[in-house]
Image (tube, helix red, strand yellow):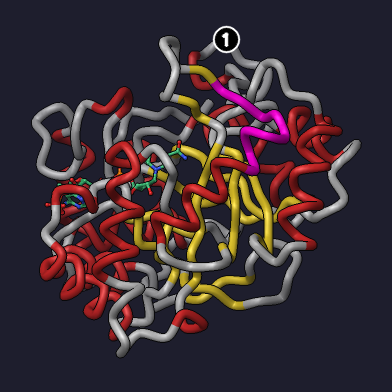
C-alpha cells in the first residue's frame, strides 16, 4: 500500500480508500469479511455518504463493523458526506446549518460511532451561505463530532467562498478522476487551444489543490464517463484496454492495478476511492498503488483513452 499525506495535516493515510457506496448489496458477513481483508492490507480509510443506499451503506457498516469487538474504532478512518437532500419532493443540495448538523447526527447514529474522522460537503449548494457552514463546522468541531473537514465536487472559487467564513482547514476535495475522465489534466495541457480538452470545466482545480495542499480523492476511478460502467474490459475503449494489458504484462500485474497506478503516479499524491466489493480486485488495486509508471507509460495510457496532446 502506498501512503500519502492528508491535506496539510502531515498525517499519513493509505492511497487507496475503501468506497462504501455499494455496501448495501452485501450481507453483514460478506461486509465483515471484506473489511477485515481491507484492514489486513492496510486499507483502513472508509468513504461513506448519508445517501449511499438510502442510508443502508452506513447502517450496514455500523452493524457489521462497528459492533465487531476485534476492530478498534481508533484504527479506522471514517469519512462521510452530507448535504444532498433526498428526503423532500425535489432532491436538492443544502448547506444550511440545521441541515448539516442533523445530517451528521443521523450518520453518526447509522454508523454506530460518536465521531467522524472527516466530513465532506457532497456537492456545491447554489444557495450556500458560507457563514452558516462556518457555524455548523464550529459546532461539530467543538462538540468532537467531526475531527476534519473537506468538500467534494467543488471548484476553487467555491472553496475560496467557504474559506471566507469557515475557520477549519478544508483538506480534501473529492472529484471524479480516471484515465478516460481526466479533463482536469487535459485542460492544463491544451492551453488556449480550440480542442475539446481545452475547456476548463473545473477552474483549474488540480493546480489549486496542489498549491493549497488539499488532497484530491479520485472517485469512480475505473468508470467510463456518465456512469456507463467500468472501462476495463469495455469494447468502447479498445486502445486503452490494449495499452493497459501491455503495460500490465511488463509489470507482471493486472490492468486494474495499472489503472490504479495511473492515478497514484500523478505527483498530486491523490487518494483513489475504490468502489469494488470484490476482495481479489481490492488486493489488485492496493498492489497497483505501489507501482510508479514511467512518463512514457503514463502518457501512453492517457493517449490510448482518446486524449490528445497539442
Ligand atoms: N463524491 C462523489 O460525488 C462520489 C460519486 C460517486 C462515488 N463516490 C465514491 O467513490 C467510490 C468509488 O466509486 P465507484 O464505485 O463508482 O468506482 P469504481 O471503483 O470505479 O467502480 C467500482 C465498480 O466497478 C466494478 N468493476 C468492474 N470491473 C472492475 C475492474 N476491473 N476494476 C475495478 N472495478 C471494477 C466493481 O465491481 P465489483 O464490485 O464486482 O468489483 C464495482 O461495481 C464510491 O464507493 C464512493 O465512496 C463519490
Residue for point 44% across, 10% down:
90
Q: Is residue 90 magenta?
A: no
On the rendered structure, is 3 left or right of 243? right
In terms of depth relative to the viewer, which is nearer, 167 or 138?
138
The residue at 51%/51% (across/down) is 217
Query: Going by the image, does 274 lie left or right of 139?
Result: left
114 vs 25, nearest the viewer: 114
Number of residues whose C-alpha sits closer than 10 Å to that of mark 1, classed few (under 14), some (14–19) or many (20 or more): few
Residue 193 at x, y percent in the picture: 61, 15
Task: Look at the image and give the residue range highlighted in magenta.
Answer: 93-101
Estimate the x, y position of residue 133 in percent, counting from the top left: 76, 37
SS assignment at label 1? loop
Residue bearing the label numbered 1: 194
Q: Is residue 296 visible?
A: no
Indicate the quadrant where residue 112 lies: bottom left
Task: Please state if 38 lies on the left or on the right of 11 as rendered.
Answer: left
- State which quarter of the image contains the N terminus: bottom left
Residue 95 belongs to magenta span? yes
Residue 158 can be seen in this image:
yes
Q: Is 172 placed above or below 153 here?
A: below
View extreme (right): residue? 164
- Residue 108, percent from left and from top: 49, 57
Horizontal side of 89 relative to 67 (left or right) equals right
66 vs 31, nearest the viewer:
66
How far across and down, in percent of the image, does residue 32 sit? 20, 72
Amino acid at each position: 500500500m502506498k501512503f500519502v499525506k492528508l491535506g496539510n495535516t502531515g498525517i499519513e493515510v493509505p492511497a487507496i480508500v475503501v468506497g462504501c457506496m455499494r455496501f448495501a448489496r452485501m450481507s453483514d458477513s460478506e461486509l465483515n469479511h471484506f473489511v477485515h481483508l481491507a484492514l489486513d492490507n492496510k486499507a483502513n480509510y472508509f468513504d461513506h455518504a448519508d445517501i449511499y443506499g438510502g442510508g443502508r451503506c452506513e447502517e450496514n457498516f455500523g452493524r457489521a463493523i462497528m459492533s465487531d469487538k476485534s476492530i478498534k474504532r481508533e484504527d479506522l478512518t471514517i469519512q462521510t458526506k452530507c448535504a444532498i437532500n433526498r428526503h423532500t419532493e425535489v432532491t436538492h443540495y443544502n448547506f444550511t446549518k440545521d441541515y448539516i448538523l442533523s445530517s451528521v447526527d443521523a450518520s453518526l447514529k447509522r454508523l454506530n460511532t460518536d465521531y467522524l474522522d472527516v466530513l465532506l460537503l457532497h456537492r456545491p449548494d447554489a444557495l450556500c451561505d458560507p457563514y452558516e457552514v462556518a457555524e455548523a463546522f464550529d459546532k461539530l468541531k467543538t462538540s468532537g463530532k467531526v475531527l476534519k473537514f473537506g468538500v467534494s465536487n467543488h471548484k476553487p472559487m467555491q472553496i475560496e467562498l467557504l474559506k471566507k467564513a469557515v475557520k477549519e482547514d478544508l483538506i480534501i476535495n473529492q472529484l471524479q478522476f480516471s484515465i478516460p475522465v481526466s479533463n482536469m489534466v487535459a485542460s492544463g495541457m491544451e492551453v488556449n487551444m480550440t480542442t475539446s480538452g481545452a475547456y476548463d470545466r473545473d477552474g483549474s482545480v488540480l493546480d489549486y489543490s496542489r498549491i493549497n495542499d488539499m488532497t484530491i480523492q479520485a472517485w469512480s476511478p475505473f468508470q467510463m464517463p456518465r456512469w456507463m460502467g467500468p472501462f476495463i474490459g469495455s469494447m468502447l475503449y479498445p486502445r486503452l484496454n490494449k495499452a493497459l494489458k501491455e503495460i500490465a504484462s511488463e509489470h507482471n500485474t493486472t490492468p486494474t492495478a495499472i489503472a490504479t497506478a495511473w492515478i497514484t503516479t500523478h505527483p498530486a499524491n491523490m487518494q483513489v476511492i475504490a468502489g469494488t466489493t470484490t476482495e481479489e480486485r481490492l488486493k489488485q488495486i492496493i498492489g497497483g498503488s505501489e507501482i510508479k509508471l514511467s512518463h512514457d507509460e503514463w502518457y501512453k495510457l492517457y493517449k490510448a483513452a482518446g486524449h490528445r496532446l497539442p
